[in-house]
Image (cartoon, rainbow, N blue to C red):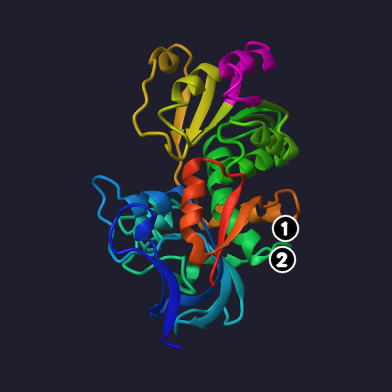
Amino acid sequence: MNAMKAVVFERHGGVEVLEYRDDLPIPQIGPNDVLLNIKATTMNYNCIWARKGLPGMDFLLPHINGTDASGVVVDIGSEVKHVKVGDEVLVLGAFSCMQCEHCASGWPMFCPDYRIWGFQTGPLDGAEAEYGRVPAVNVVPKPSNVGHEGAAAIGAVLATAWRMLVTRARMQSGDWVMVWGASGGLGTVAIQLCKAFNAKVIAIAGSDAKCQLAADLGADHVINRNKQRIAREVMKITGKRGVDIVFEHSGAETWETSQQCLKWGGTIVTCGATTGFKATMDIRFLWNKQQTYLGSHYATMAELKESLLCVERGQIKPVLHEVISLKDVARGHEILESGEVLGKIVLIPG
Ligand SMILES: [Zn+2]
């Protein structure tokens, strides 16, 4: 065994640059790493950005995408003590030095060595492969009540939503939370997380099927953004008060509406900007209404572990749009880019 299957690209471009190969080297592990036989990974918007290339960001080529993984440990480094060969684990795909002041104080995102796996790592270092090298501190036991596909689908989005809503925005029971992109990977877990905390959800989605999914997941109200005026509906639902928290990950197209729907003193928390990085903003909302705008990036191991307890307890379930073979990854890119996703696209080797 010295070669593995993986999806790789050697230049940026359309889906035609994605190449499924079976002759790539199996990663070599260091003393603090584990080697994972990857059973499932998922698609994130980073996969699209990495494939297309982002201005101002140098990707190490050849590149293997993939930040989430669930799989079985097949080898461990000499210094690894808490993970065994044969363990079924889930990966937090954000690696850092674990020694600097930021890592030690619970802010690994500020670590100078912070890297998102399969996005900023490389070359040939990502989860869209048969095997992956991962620091042992970045794996947690897979929840016992979901398979590898479900585990890969839920880990990163749930931990990200947990950090946004619980750690950063300090969601409370009874809060009104407005969730953008309610039918996507992040939205589907955000709705369930809000309900686990007994918060009230206004879900925003772009089609009847997407609205139905949000309602099925427990959203108290659903707004079809292509048919209804969002701010007017939100004010009607909340008795002209506005929501306590807006769950943002869309950016340029939605930011102004997020501000309009937010109550005086409310909080917008964001972890991304898939519709564009530059939004306009009426600064009166900031000083007069004393709204708070918080950024949030991925999650810590503690947040992943704590959020997975909700999965173990059956409060939050993965939502899988489709399971696709790595060979057909191009189709996954097309579906994700079209915006026609209900939950997560899972990729399996083979
Ligand atoms: Zn560090």
Residue 144: numbered disc:
2
Q: Is residue 324 above or below residue 278?
A: below
Q: Is residue 232 magenta?
A: yes
User: x and y percent of residue 53 in the render?
Assistant: 30, 50
| Residue 92, visible in the rendered structure | no
Residue 18: numbered disc:
none
Residue 241: quadrant of the picture: top right
Q: Is residue 171 above or below residue 76?
A: above
Please report the residue visible at 61 percent of the width from the left and 47 percent of the height from the top: 343
Question: What amino acid is labelled 1 in the image?
Answer: Glu
Q: How many marks?
A: 2
Distance Cα–Cα, label 2 vs label 1? 7 Å
Q: Is residue 226 above or below residue 325?
A: above
The single residue placed furthest to the bottom in the displayed view is 1
| Residue 19, visible in the rendered structure | yes
Q: Could you tell me which quadrant the C terminus lies in?
A: bottom right
User: x and y percent of residue 91 in the render?
Assistant: 53, 64
Q: Is residue 234 above or below residue 127?
A: above
What's the magenta region?
223-244
Between 350 and 140, the one lying in front of the other is: 350
State the residue position of label 1: 312
